[in-house]
């Protein structure tokens, strides 16, 4: 992890953040109140596995489309940690 001075090989080669969400990733859906860069910076600093961060389009039974932010992680433990910290990260108030 970056915060402990350890180099992550996936980050060095640009392989941590994916442009698509693989089916085996654990997805956390939420409404973003901060910009995407703040979220990705937190993930790069505090987690170490591969992840996807982007929009998820969901069609309801009445054929209406809703858009929510999705953070998906290859490691289920990292998705749990992100979900627990989401209220602290996804706030417009200064920490």
Image (cartoon, rainbow, N blue to C red):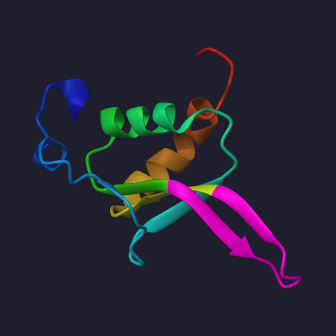
Q: Residue furthest bottom?
A: 61
Residue 13 place in picture, x, y as percent: 12, 48
- Report which quarter residue 25 is drawn in: bottom left
Which quadrant does the N terminus fall into? top left
Main secondary structure of the magenta stretch: strand
Q: Nearer the viewer, residue 58 or 43?
A: 58
Question: Which residue is outermost to the top?
Answer: 94
Residue at 78%, 71% in the rendered image: 65
Q: Is residue 49 above or below residue 85?
A: below
Question: In the displayed structure, would residue 49 be above or below residue 12?
Answer: below
Can you say which quadrant of the picture contains the C terminus? top right
**Left or right: 29 with respect to 78?**
right
Give the answer, above or below, for where 8 lies relative to 25: above
* x 32%, y 38%: residue: 44
Residue at left offset 36%, top offset 56%: 51
Picture mark count: 0
Q: Is residue 1 magenta?
A: no
- What is the quadrant of residue 43 in the picture? top left
Q: Nearer the viewer, residue 36 or 31?
A: 36
In this picture, residue 94 sits left or right of residue 24: right
* 91 sits to left or right of 76: right
Magenta span includes 67? yes
Residue 73 in which image quadrant: bottom left
Q: Is residue 87 left or right of residue 16?
A: right
Q: Position of residue 80 (x, y in %)?
A: 48, 54
Q: Is residue 32 above or below residue 45?
A: below
Residue 93 in picture, x, y percent from top left: 68, 18
Give the magenta range: 54-68
């Amino acid at each position: 992890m970056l915060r402990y001075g350890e180099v992550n090989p996936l980050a060095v080669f640009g392989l941590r953040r994916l442009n698509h969400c693989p089916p085996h990733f654990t997805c956390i859906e939420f409404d973003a109140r901060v910009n995407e860069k703040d979220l990705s910076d937190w993930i790069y600093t505090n987690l170490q596995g591969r992840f996807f961060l982007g929009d998820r389009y969901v069609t309801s039974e009445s054929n209406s489309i809703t858009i929510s932010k999705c953070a998906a992680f290859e490691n289920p433990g990292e998705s749990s940690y992100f979900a627990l910290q989401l209220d602290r990260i996804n706030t417009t108030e200064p920490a």
